[in-house]
Amino acid sequence: MFEETFKSLIEQSEITIGDFAVCSLVSIGIGIIISVIMLFISKNKSKSMILTTALLPFVVQVIIMMVNGNIGIGLAVAGTFGLIRFRSYPGSADDLIVIFISMAVGLINGVGYIWVAIIFAVVALVIYIIYSLLGVGGDPVYSKELHVTIPENLNYAHEFDDIFGKYAKRYNLYRVKTTNFGSMYTLYYNLDLIDDAKEKDMIDEIRCRNGNLDIICGLASTDPKELL
């Protein structure tokens, strides 16, 4: 009985319309379920990430089918898609695992094992939901994007290291821009605050050092276009 249940739907090199339709419906359905789960668990996910997880199983499935089940070639092509996705977007660890779940579902469906794909998706997503709801992984992270304007005579490379060391678990200067005809710099930081309630104290210390010039602090952007 189990041998028949986990038997591949595709047993020959030629793919029938019926087989393609069944596998595609399963891939699209699982992809939508994955994207909906991400949408409710992670409120700050970008539109592009939700769309990626919804369509990735179907895309990978079609790739595997078109290379006649050659998993090596299919994984190489699908893996390239995944690398392109994360080359332009600083995804977190949970983004990465969801991408791999989506790719695995498409891969399994691509060789016709639809019941294996369904069972795998259910088990993987249940574990993902449990770990997300339990908050496994440590203290909450308050991700912020900080823009600081400074006069040109300040050495911006390490000027605020001591301040960020007090208030942030992690910080990164990812962009520098000249402004006011080159007489000032605008520094762009990504940082994870230790305590969100201490944000004002951090800004006050920065104001004392940058001569009370403009400071903008807000939620970290999840859209790479907004970082330009």
Image (cartoon, helix red, strand yellow):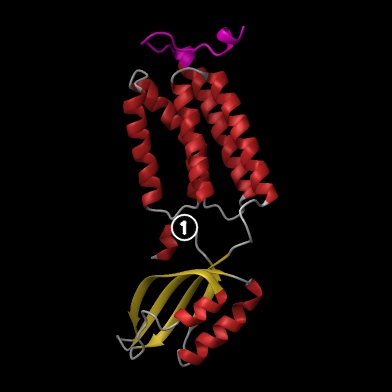
- Where 81 falls versus 2 (above or below)? below
Q: Position of residue 38 (x, y in %)?
A: 59, 45
The residue closer to the viewer here, 224 or 187, is 187
* 9 falls in the magenta region: yes
Outermost residue, right side: 134
- Where 64 falls versus 138 (above or below)? above
The residue closer to the viewer here, 16 or 81, is 81
Question: Which residues fall within the magenta stretch?
Answer: 1-19
Q: Amino acid at mark 1?
A: Asp
Q: Secondary structure at mark 1?
A: loop
* Quadrant position of residue 70: top left
* Quadrant position of residue 219: bottom right
How many marks do you count on the picture? 1
Quadrant (top left, top right, bottom left, bottom right) of the C terminus: bottom left
Question: Who's the residue at 49% across and 19% down the image?
Answer: 21
| Type of secondary structure dominating the magenta stretch | loop
**Crowd class of label 1 (few under 14; some 14 to 19; many from 20; radius 10 Å):** some
Question: Who's the residue at 56% across and 8% down the image?
Answer: 3
Q: Position of residue 64 (x, y in %)?
A: 38, 24
Q: Which residue is mark 1?
A: 223
The residue closer to the viewer here, 121 or 45, is 121
